[in-house]
Image (cartoon, rainbow, N blue to C red):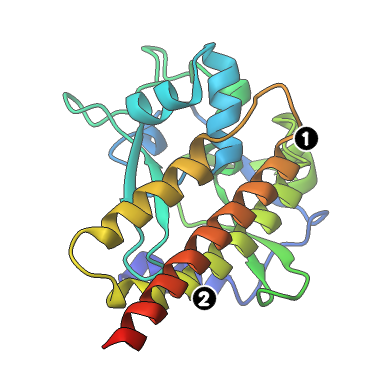
Amino acid sequence: MNDREELIQELMKNPIGKDETFYFKCRQCGECCKNRVDILLSPFDLCRMAKALGKHLHEVLYEYGNLYVGGTSKVPLVSLNMRRDNGKCPFLMEDNRCRIHNHKPTACALYPLGRGATGDIEGKRKIFYILQPTDCGEYYEAHTPREWLDEFELEESEQWFSVWQGIVMEISERIRTVLPKMPGRSGDELLMGIAQILYLRYKLEQPLIPQVKENAILVGKMITMVEGTLANATGRM
């Protein structure tokens, strides 16, 4: 754990309430939009971006996303790709404004706030906010997390975040058990199938939360089939 991660862990002990005041004023320096490898994109983010750009989901994922497997969770995750030539966000314009400002990824819209959730897989998750350490911006303009969310029409993102966190936790628990038992490249094939369902199986004109829940059920059935196949193979030995 590096110094920044340790500081964030410490800040999590004293979260900011949704209606508590924090102080921050963006100077539009663009520093938070450069050389970032930590901006994760949920299906919610990808769908918002697809609508803003007038593109299909698979186009957004392959043009702007980096699909990888979480080192600890083993769940397929997507991060926002920076430009190779200068390390800047592909949506950062010359004047340091965002090309998709009103539909930017949730992690970007929340900045300098961070968001987390407590609770187990079965229980109701409690959402909390922290003020992340940053060297940019100024600290005289008052806000609350609620106002910050409203500015980007992200009030519903709390429900999305809670649902998505629960899905990732559940899939992670099951997949970390089954992957070590899978032969050859079958584990990679399973992960690719899970990624396609979790991130690409959406109709943009329909409510997204019911769709992501349905997709999670499909992934669960896929893992159950793999578990059954492995059990049968073990039984024949």
Which of the 4 quarters of the picture holds residue 49?
top right
Q: Which mark is residue 150?
A: 1
User: Could you tell me how far apart the alpha carbons at marks 2 and 1 are, in whole angstroms?
Assistant: 27 Å
Q: Is residue 226 left or right of residue 157?
A: left
Q: Residues within 10 Å of mark 2 (few under 14, many from 20)?
A: few
- Between marks 2 and 1 in the image, the one whose residue lies nearer the viewer: 1
**From this viewpoint, is residue 8 visible?**
yes
Quadrant in which the C terminus appears? bottom left
Q: Is residue 234 above or below residue 66?
A: below
Q: Is residue 29 left or right of residue 131?
A: left
Residue that label 2 marks:
10
Q: Is residue 89 above or below residue 76?
A: above
Q: Earlier in the sequence, mark 2 or mark 1?
A: 2
In front: 22, or 54?
54
**Count of number-bearing discs:** 2
Query: In the image, what residue type sits under mark 1?
Result: Asp
